[in-house]
Image (cartoon, rainbow, N blue to C red):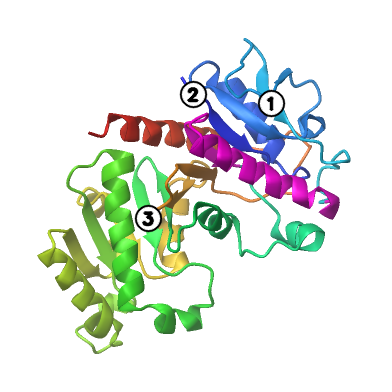
Amino acid sequence: MLPIAISCGEPAGVGPEVAVAAWAALGAETPLVWLGDPRHLPKGTPVHETDDPGDRKTGKLTVLPRDFGAPAIPGQPDPAHAQGVIDAIGDAVALVEAGKARALCTAPIHKAALIDGAGFAYPGHTEYLAALAGIRQVVMMLACDGLRVVPTTIHIPLAEVPGQLSASLLSETIGITHAALRRDFGIAAPRIAVSGLNPHAGEDGKIGREEQDTIIPVLEALRLQGFALTGPLSADTMFHEGARAGYDAAICMYHDQALIPIKTLDFSGGVNITLGLPFIRTSPDHGTAFDIAGKGMADATSMIAAIRMAATMADARDAAP
């Protein structure tokens, strides 16, 4: 079985230690290959350094070594590591695209260090991966065992959401999500719930016009194309247990509308997934956690879930006709 590639992420954060903890927990369940500077892994990690991702040794973490030039100090990001972090992501993508790895799981990065050290020109991982793949539009999904959510607008001020919420953006977001549910999750006929933007989904235009002017026309057009869509729904009634049983994914209009319910349901086990890429990419749904890096306190639950999710998605793609 091909391995899942793990890019090292920020060496001064918890990425290296949760990667090693996930490898230890998963055992032989899922082969892994880690890309980064081996000096940045927790002391005592048994590693097998190689330039062949398929070259594995029992009881050792397969590492494709990169020289970042200096050791890492937990909790203290070093801009000198920036180019190495960026290159590890690119090299991991190249492995997947070359058919030498099944999927990519990325450890958290620290954007300020990447900007300071290498002039990183992207808002984050997702946009950089889209650029590497030559893809214009991708979609962020957060998933756990009980819920999949997609925010239509993401990291923008709340005041800017109504202006950014266009018919084309919503239509593309739903379309990419629908295709991914079929290809990556093996759901032949996806059921998608769509929230409104305003309280009570606008109450027929009495509490805002975005539902009437943008969301409803998009849903009507997509239903004519065969999409199974419900909505626009009042967001405060979408996420209780009975409601979640009625759909495979929920499309929300802005960041917190999507992330609050999933982080309430499963704070430690959520997985960040980039939909719309030609390859599979997952990530733990947490940051670098500099305050606890190197202290043996990091929780690997989300990294384990991200690796398992990547493997499950790869299985779905392999099984697709």
Name which of mark 2 and mark 3 comes first in the sequence.
2
* Disc 3 residue crowd, few under 14, some 14–19, many 20+, Cα 10 Å: many
Secondary element under disc 2, as helix, strand or loop, is: loop
Q: Which mark is residue 2?
A: 2
- Front disc: 2 or 3: 2
Q: Do the residues bearing badges 3 and 1 touch, measured as CB atoms within 8 Å?
A: no
Q: Amino acid at mark 2?
A: Leu
Query: Which sits earlier in the primary sequence, circle 1 or circle 2?
Result: 2
- Front in this rendered view, residue 45 or 95: 95
> What segment carries the magenta color?
78-106
Q: How would you rate the neighbour count of disc 2 (Cα within 10 Å): few for under 14, some for 14-19, many for 20 or more?
A: some
Residue located at (49% from left, 83% from top): 159
Q: Which residue is mark 1?
A: 63
Q: Main secondary structure of the magenta part?
A: helix
- At label 3, the amino acid type is Val
Relative horizontal placement of residue 36, taking residue 252 as reference (left or right): right
Report the disc number at residue 149: 3
What's the CA distance linking mark 2 and mark 3? 29 Å
Q: Position of residue 303 (x, y in %)?
A: 56, 37
User: Where's residue 146, x and y in %?
Assistant: 34, 44
